[in-house]
C-alpha cells in the first residue's frame, strides 16, 4: 500500500522517436514509494520503450528523469541499478545451465580470495528469498525449473542488487493462473515492504486487483493516470483503445462437419528425450474448435509440433482427412492445408531481422503469387503485407520494417495474421493472444471464429481458461501427456477443468 | 552493447562513413610505422597510390589482384548469409586451380567452349570441395570451420602431389603443369598488365548472388536459415538441404576465383609452397563489404589496390611492403570493432532534440 506520497521516480516530457514512429511523445510518469503502478496501453503504445528508458536501455530524445527528486541521466542499466532500479524483461535473461544461486549473484559474486564463494552465495540468496517470501531452490539449474520459478529468480536478481524500483514487463503473460496468483502475492508483499513496482500488463482484471494506480498510454501519449477503484474494466479498455471494446465474446453454436484431424495412440518424446505424449487419441471436425486445457509443460507444445510435422512420433498415427500425415515434413503438411501459430513467436514464429513483408510470407514463400518458379514477386509480397497490416492493425513504420523493431504485441499479430491468411483446413493455434491488448485480442478471437465458421477445424492450445472457455466448442484436458478428460463446452465448469489440469482424474465424456 | 544498439536513420551512408573512418585511421597508424621505419609517410602513400592506380598498367595489375578477391569475398559473404563460416575458400580455390589447369590442357575443343568448360570445371571442383563440409554439417552437425580448415590442407597437399606426379609438365624438371591451350585462356585487356575477362565474370557473379539472395525463394531460404534456423524449420524450409546447397555454391564461387587465376593470369599451375591467400583475404573482403555482394567489390578493390600498391611502394620509395600488411590488419581490426566507432559517433550526437512541430505522433505509415 502506498505510504504517503513520496515520489521515487519522476519522468517528464519523455520523447523517443524511431524511424517512422514516435514511441513516446512527451510522456509524464510518476512512481511513488510503496505503490504498484500499472502501465496499460494497446500494442505499440510505448510502454516497453518508456520503461527501457528508465532502465537505461535506450536514451530519450528529450525529457527529464528525476530519481528521489534529483535529475539523473540514465545511460545504461549499470547506472539504473546504481539508482536502485531493476527490470524483469518479458524474455528472461538467465543462463540455463547455471544454478539459481549462481544466476542471482552473477556479476556481483561473493568471493573468498580470488575464488567464487559458493556457500556464501547460497546463504545470501537464501536470506533474501526468506526476507521477501520468494521460495526458490538455490541449487536447481535454471533449465530444469518452470517459467514461474525463473521469473522469481529474475525478481530476486533485482532485489539482490538492492532495487527499490522493480519494473515488470508483462510478467503474467507466460504464467499459469496459479503462478499469476502467487506473483500477485509477491508483488503485494514487496510493495508493503516499501518497494515501488511498475507492472505492465494487458489483463485488465490484474490491474484492478493489484494496482494502486494505473497510467494509460495510447500512441505514445499519456491518456491519464487514475485509481482502479475510480474506474471500471470497460472504461480502462476504452481509454486504451479509444473505442468501445466488447470484453465478452458472443458466438454462434458450432455446426461441425466431417472429421479433419485424427490422432490415434500418438506418443512422442520431448527435447530431453522423456515421454511427452502418451497414447493420445483425439479428433477435430471441420467447423469446430477443440480447446486443449492444461498446465504448461504437460505435452501441449509437443502435441501441436507433432501434428505440424516438427516432431517425430514414437507410436500411433495421425490423419488429415483420410490421409496419413505423420512422417511427412512441415512443408508437405502445410501444403496439405495445415496452418500453425507457434507459441514462441521470437524463437520460432518470426525471423526478427527479416522485414515485416518477408515474415508475412514465411511458409507460403514458395507459392503463388509470392513466387513464380524460383523468382520472388516483390510487388505481390508488398501488397500482401499492406493488406495484412491494415486488416490486423499492425503498428509499424512500413512493410519494410524489421520484425524485431515491432512491439511484442505487434509481433504476435504478424504471426497470427500469417497463419490465418492461408485459409487453412486445419488451424493449430498455440497461445494466440499472448501479449495482445484487449482490442487485438477481441479481433483475433473473432478471426478464429470466422475460420471455424468457414469450415476450418481448429485446435486451440491456451494456458488461459477464460480464452478456452470463450472460444472452444469442446475441451480436452491434457495432463502429463495424456488426455484425461474430454467435454462439450457446456458440460464442464471452470472448477472441474482446474481440478483435472492439476491431476485429479475424471471419466472422459463426450 | 547489443541492447544499446541504435537504429540508424541512414544506415547506408553511416555504414560508408564508418568504414571510411576505419580506413583513414588505419592509414594513419600505418603512417606511424612508416615514420618509425625511417621514411616519409607522405611519399610512401603517394608511391602506394601511384603504384595502385597511376597509368593503365598499374591499374590493370590492381585489377588482377582484385578479381579473385571479389570472388572469394563473395563466396564467404554468401556462406555467412546462411550462418556458415567458410574458412575453406582457400582449399576450394586450390582444387579449382588444379582442375582448371588440367582441363585447360585438353586438346581438340573449340576456343570459346574450352574456356567455358575450364571455368565450369573449376567451379564444380570448388563446389564439391565446399559441399563436403556442408554435408558433414547438415548430417552430423560437425562444425564447418574445423572441416574447411582440414580440407584446406588436404587441397594443398593434394595439389602438390598432382603437380609433382600425374600433371607435371614434361620433361618433369620443375613442379608445374603444362601451359593451357590458347582457347582456354581468358582474354586480357589493358596490356601489358594481366587484367582479364575474369573481372567481368566476377562482377557478374556479384550481380548473380545479389539476385539469388534477394530475388529468389532459394535466397529467401538461405537468409532465413542464417538468421533463425528454428523459424526456418517451422517455415517448411529444409535446413539441411539449404546448408549443403549454400556451401556448394560458396565453394563454386571460390572455385571460380581459382579458375580465373589460371585462365586469366598464370595459364598453368605452379606448385604451391604455401597457401596463396586469396581465400583468407576473402574473409577480410567480406567483412569490409558487410557481407553484401556489392560491398564485396569495394572491399576487394581496396585490398587489391593495397597489395599491388605495396609492391610499387617498396620499389619506388623503399618502404617495406609489410607495412601495408599492418594497414590491412588494422582496417580489419577496426571494421570488426566498429561498435567502438559507433559509440564514438553517438557520444558526439548526444544533444537532446525535441518533437518537431507538425510531426505525427504514434505511427506514420
Ligand atoms: N528498436 C526499435 N526500432 C524501431 N521501432 C521500435 C523499436 N522499439 C520499439 N519501436 C516502435 O515503438 C513503438 C512502441 O513500442 P513498445 O515496444 O514500447 O510498445 P509496447 O507499448 O510495449 O507494446 P506491446 O504491448 O505490444 O508490447 C512501436 O510502434 C514499435 O514498433
Ligand atoms: Mg512491450
Image: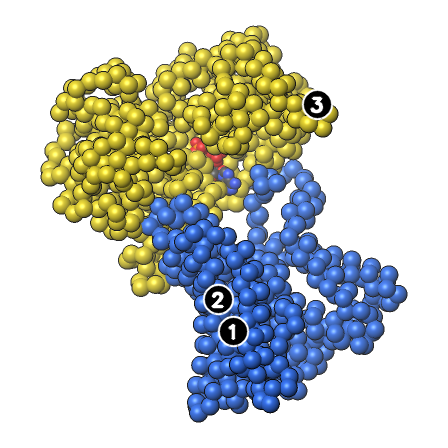
Name the tint of chain A in the rendering.
yellow
> Can you give x and y, in whole percent of width and height, for residue A109 in the image?
65, 25
> Which residue is rendered at x = 68% and y = 46% of the image?
B340
Task: Report the residue at 55% width, 39% height from top.
Answer: A17
Q: Residue at x 35, y 28 (%)?
A: A297
- Which residue appears at 40% of the width and 24% of the height? A175
Image coordinates of residue A333 in percent, x first then y, are 25, 48
- Whichever of labels 2 and 1 marks the residue nearer the N terminus, that label is 1
Label 1 crowd bin: few (<14), some (14–19), many (20+), radius 10 Å: many
Q: Are marks 2 and 1 on the same chain?
A: yes
Cα separation, mark 2 vs mark 1, equals 9 Å
Q: Secondary structure at mark 3?
A: strand
The relative height of residue A141 versus residue A367 in the rendered view (above or below) is above
| Within-10-Å neighbours for mark 2: few <14, some 14–19, many 20+ | many
Q: Which mark is residue A290?
A: none
What scheme was used to colour the molecule? by chain
Of all chains, the one bearing label 2 is B
Compared across the picture, whether A416 is left or right of B12 comes to: left
A83 or B303: nearer the eye?
B303
Is the distance from the Cβ of mark 2 to the nearest ligand 1 atom less than 8 Å?
A: no
Q: What shade has chain B been given?
A: blue
Spatial CA span between label 1 and label 3: 59 Å
Residue named by callout 1: B96
Q: Which residue has dot 2 on it?
A: B129
Q: Are the residues at dot 1 and dot 3 in contact (C-beta closer than 8 Å)?
A: no
* Above or below A207: residue A452: below
Q: Are marks 2 and 1 in contact (CB under 8 Å)?
A: yes
Q: Where residue A310 sits: x, y (%)?
A: 32, 43
Which of A74 and A78 lies nearest the eye of the viewer?
A78
Q: Which residue is mark 3?
A: A112
Amino acid at each position: 500500500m502506498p505510504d504517503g506520497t513520496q515520489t521515487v521516480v519522476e519522468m517528464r516530457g519523455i520523447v523517443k522517436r524511431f524511424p517512422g514512429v514516435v514511441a513516446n511523445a512527451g510522456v509524464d510518469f510518476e512512481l511513488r514509494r510503496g505503490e504498484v503502478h500499472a502501465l496499460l496501453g494497446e500494442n505499440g503504445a510505448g510502454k516497453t520503450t518508456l520503461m527501457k528508458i528508465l532502465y537505461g536501455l535506450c536514451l530519450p530524445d528529450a525529457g527529464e528523469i528525476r530519481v528521489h527528486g534529483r535529475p539523473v541521466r540514465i545511460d545504461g542499466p549499470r547506472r539504473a541499478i546504481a539508482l536502485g532500479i531493476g527490470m524483469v524483461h518479458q524474455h528472461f535473461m538467465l543462463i540455463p545451465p547455471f544454478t539459481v544461486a549462481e544466476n542471482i549473484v552473477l556479476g556481483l559474486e561473493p568471493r573468498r580470495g580470488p575464488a567464487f564463494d559458493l556457500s556464501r552465495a547460497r546463504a545470501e540468496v537464501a536470506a533474501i528469498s526468506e526476507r521477501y517470501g520468494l521460495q526458490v531452490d538455490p541449487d536447481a539449474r535454471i533449465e530444469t525449473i518452470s517459467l514461474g520459478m525463473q521469473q522469481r529468480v529474475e525478481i530476486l536478481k533485482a532485489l539482490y542488487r538492492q532495487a527499490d524500483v522493480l519494473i515488470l514487463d508483462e510478467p503474467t503473460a507466460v504464467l499459469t493462473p496459479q503462478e499469476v496468483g502467487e506473483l500477485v502475492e509477491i508483488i503485494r508483499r514487496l510493495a508493503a515492504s516499501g518497494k515501488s513496482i511498475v507492472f505492465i500488463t494487458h489483463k485488465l482484471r490484474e490491474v484492478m486487483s493489484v494496482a494502486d494506480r494505473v497510467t494509460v498510454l495510447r500512441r505514445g501519449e499519456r491518456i491519464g493516470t487514475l485509481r482502479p477503484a475510480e474506474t471500471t474494466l470497460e472504461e480502462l479498455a476504452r481509454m486504451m483503445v479509444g473505442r468501445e471494446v466488447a470484453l465478452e465474446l458472443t458466438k454462434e453454436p458450432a455446426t461441425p462437419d466431417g472429421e479433419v484431424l485424427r490422432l490415434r495412440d500418438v506418443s512422442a518424446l520431448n527435447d530431453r528425450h522423456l515421454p511427452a505424449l502418451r497414447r493420445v487419441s483425439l479428433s477435430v471436425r471441420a467447423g469446430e474448435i477443440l480447446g486443449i486445457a492444461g498446465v504448461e509443460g504437460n505435452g501441449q507444445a509437443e502435441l501441436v509440433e507433432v501434428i505440424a510435422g516438427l516432431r517425430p512420433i514414437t507410436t500411433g498415427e495421425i490423419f488429415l482427412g483420410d490421409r496419413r500425415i505423420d512422417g511427412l515434413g512441415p512443408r508437405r503438411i502445410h501444403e496439405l492445408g495445415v496452418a500453425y501459430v507457434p507459441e514462441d513467436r521470437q524463437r520460432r514464429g518470426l525471423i526478427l531481422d527479416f522485414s515485416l513483408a518477408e515474415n508475412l510470407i514465411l511458409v507460403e514463400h514458395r507459392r503463388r503469387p509470392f513466387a513464380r518458379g524460383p523468382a520472388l514477386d516483390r510487388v505481390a509480397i508488398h501488397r500482401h503485407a499492406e493488406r495484412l497490416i491494415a486488416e490486423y492493425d499492425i503498428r509499424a513504420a512500413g512493410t519494410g520494417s524489421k520484425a524485431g523493431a515491432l512491439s511484442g504485441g505487434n509481433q504476435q499479430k504478424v504471426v497470427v495474421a500469417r497463419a490465418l491468411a492461408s485459409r487453412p483446413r486445419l488451424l493449430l493455434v498455440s497461445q494466440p493472444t499472448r501479449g495482445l491488448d484487449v482490442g487485438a485480442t477481441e479481433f483475433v478471437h473473432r478471426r478464429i471464429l470466422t475460420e471455424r465458421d468457414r469450415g476450418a477445424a481448429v485446435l486451440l492450445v491456451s494456458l488461459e481458461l477464460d480464452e478456452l472457455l470463450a472460444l472452444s466448442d469442446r475441451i480436452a484436458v491434457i495432463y502429463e501427456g495424456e488426455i484425461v478428460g474430454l467435454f462439450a463446452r457446456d458440460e464442464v465448469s471452470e472448477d472441474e477443468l482446474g481440478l483435472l489440469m492439476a491431476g485429479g482424474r475424471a471419466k472422459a465424456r463426450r | 552493447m547489443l541492447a544499446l544498439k541504435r537504429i540508424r536513420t541512414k544506415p547506408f551512408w553511416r555504414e560508408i562513413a564508418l568504414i571510411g573512418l576505419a580506413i583513414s585511421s588505419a592509414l594513419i597508424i600505418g603512417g606511424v610505422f612508416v615514420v618509425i621505419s625511417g621514411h616519409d609517410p607522405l611519399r610512401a602513400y603517394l608511391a602506394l597510390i601511384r603504384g595502385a592506380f597511376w597509368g593503365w598498367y598499374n591499374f590493370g595489375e590492381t585489377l588482377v589482384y582484385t578479381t579473385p578477391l571479389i570472388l572469394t569475398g563473395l563466396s564467404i559473404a554468401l556462406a555467412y548469409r546462411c550462418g556458415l563460416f567458410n574458412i575453406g575458400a582457400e582449399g576450394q580455390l586450390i582444387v579449382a586451380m588444379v582442375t582448371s589447369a588440367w582441363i585447360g590442357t585438353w586438346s581438340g575443343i573449340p576456343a570459346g567452349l574450352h574456356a567455358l568448360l575450364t571455368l565450369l570445371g573449376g567451379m564444380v571442383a570448388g563446389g564439391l570441395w565446399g559441399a563436403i563440409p556442408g554435408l558433414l554439417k547438415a548430417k552430423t552437425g560437425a562444425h564447418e570451420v574445423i572441416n574447411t580448415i582440414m580440407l584446406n590442407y588436404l587441397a594443398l597437399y593434394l595439389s602438390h602431389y598432382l603437380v609433382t606426379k600425374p600433371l607435371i609438365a614434361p620433361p618433369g624438371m620443375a613442379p608445374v603443369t603444362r601451359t593451357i591451350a590458347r582457347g582456354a585462356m581468358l582474354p586480357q585487356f589493358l596490356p601489358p598488365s594481366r587484367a582479364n575477362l575474369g573481372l567481368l565474370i566476377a562482377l557478374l557473379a556479384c550481380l548473380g548472388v545479389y539476385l539469388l539472395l534477394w530475388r529468389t525463394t532459394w535466397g529467401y531460404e538461405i537468409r532465413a536459415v542464417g538468421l533463425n534456423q528454428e523459424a526456418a524449420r517451422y517455415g517448411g524450409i529444409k535446413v539441411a538441404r539449404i546448408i549443403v546447397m549454400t556451401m556448394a555454391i560458396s565453394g563454386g564461387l571460390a572455385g571460380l576465383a581459382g579458375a580465373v587465376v589460371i585462365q586469366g593470369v598464370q595459364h598453368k599451375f605452379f606448385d604451391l609452397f604455401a597457401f596463396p591467400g586469396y581465400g583468407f583475404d576473402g574473409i577480410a573482403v567480406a567483412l569490409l563489404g558487410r557481407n553484401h555482394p556489392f560491398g564485396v567489390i569495394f572491399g576487394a578493390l581496396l585490398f587489391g589496390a593495397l597489395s599491388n600498391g605495396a609492391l610499387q611502394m617498396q620499389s619506388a620509395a623503399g618502404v617495406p611492403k609489410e607495412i601495408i600488411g599492418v594497414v590491412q590488419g588494422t582496417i580489419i581490426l577496426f571494421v570488426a570493432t566498429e561498435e567502438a566507432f559507433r559509440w564514438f559517433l553517438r557520444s558526439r550526437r548526444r544533444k537532446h532534440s525535441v518533437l518537431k512541430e507538425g510531426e505525427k505522433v504514434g505511427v506514420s505509415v
